[in-house]
């Protein structure tokens, strides 16, 4: 079984290290979105969201491995979180973006670190 999921295991190991950086960056940007906006906040947010997008792609590619014995990550829940972030970003309302990050994305990515 280990060999069967070798690529997925390697991808998850890379994701785990990268995810720590993304979580840290999200925690840094929330206060900026809530009113302490800096000159580069929008650019920084876009950079972070590209990283989140990469993580979602890795999750999609490793979902069979992650959920091989029981459902560890719900694809439906992950999609709902991604949709919420997309809607908030599309609204260009920094308060909505901060809320979507704090209430959906951050808890999801922090739980991912535990898996």
Image (cartoon, rainbow, N blue to C red):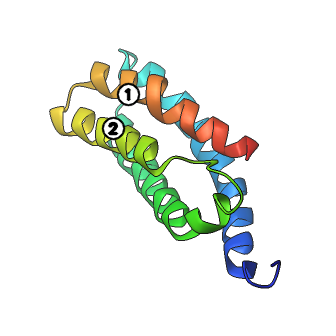
Against 30, residue 47 (above or below) is: below
Of the pair 98 and 113, the residue shown nearer to us = 113
Residue, disc 2: 85
Against 14, residue 45 (above or below) is: above
Pointer 1 or 2: first along the chain: 2
Left or right? Give the position of 106 relative to 82.
right
Disc 1 to disc 2, how far (Cα)? 6 Å
Q: Give coordinates of residue 98: x percent, y percent.
A: 38, 24
Residue positioned 28% across, 23% down in the render: 96
Q: Work out whether residue 37 can be spotted.
A: no
In the orientation shown, which residue stands out farthest toward the left? 91
Q: Give coordinates of residue 49: x percent, y percent.
A: 40, 49
Against 61, residue 35 (above or below) is: above
Of the pair 101 and 24, the residue shown nearer to us = 101
Crowd rating for badge 2 (residues with CA inside 10 Å; few <14, some 14–19, many 20+): many
Query: In terms of secondary structure, where does tag 2 sit?
Result: helix
In the orientation shown, which residue stands out farthest toward the right? 2
Q: Give coordinates of residue 108: x percent, y percent.
A: 55, 37
Query: In terms of secondary structure, where does tag 1 sit?
Result: helix
In the orientation shown, which residue stands out farthest toward the front? 69
Against 73, residue 2 (above or below) is: below
Residue positioned 40% across, 17% down in the render: 36
Crowd rating for badge 1 (residues with CA inside 10 Å; few <14, some 14–19, many 20+): many
Query: For the image shown, how many numbered marks are present on the structure?
Result: 2
Q: Work out whether residue 55 can be spotted.
A: yes
- Badge 1 vs badge 2, beta-carbon distance below 8 Å: yes
Residue positioned 64% across, 48% down in the render: 72
Of the pair 35 and 94, the residue shown nearer to us = 94
Q: Give coordinates of residue 114: x percent, y percent.
A: 75, 41
Residue, disc 1: 100
Q: Quadrant of the N terminus?
A: bottom right
């Amino acid at each position: 079984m280990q060999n069967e999921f070798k690529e997925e295991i390697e991808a998850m190991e890379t994701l785990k290290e990268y995810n720590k950086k993304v979580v840290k960056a999200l925690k840094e940007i929330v206060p900026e979105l809530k009113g302490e906006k800096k000159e580069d906040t929008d650019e920084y947010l876009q950079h972070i969201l590209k990283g989140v997008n990469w993580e979602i792609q890795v999750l999609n590619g490793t979902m069979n491995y992650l959920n091989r014995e029981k459902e560890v990550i719900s694809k439906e829940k992950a999609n709902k979180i991604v949709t919420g972030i997309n809607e908030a970003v599309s609204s260009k309302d920094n308060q909505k973006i901060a809320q979507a990050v704090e209430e959906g994305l951050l808890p999801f990515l922090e739980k991912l670190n535990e898996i």
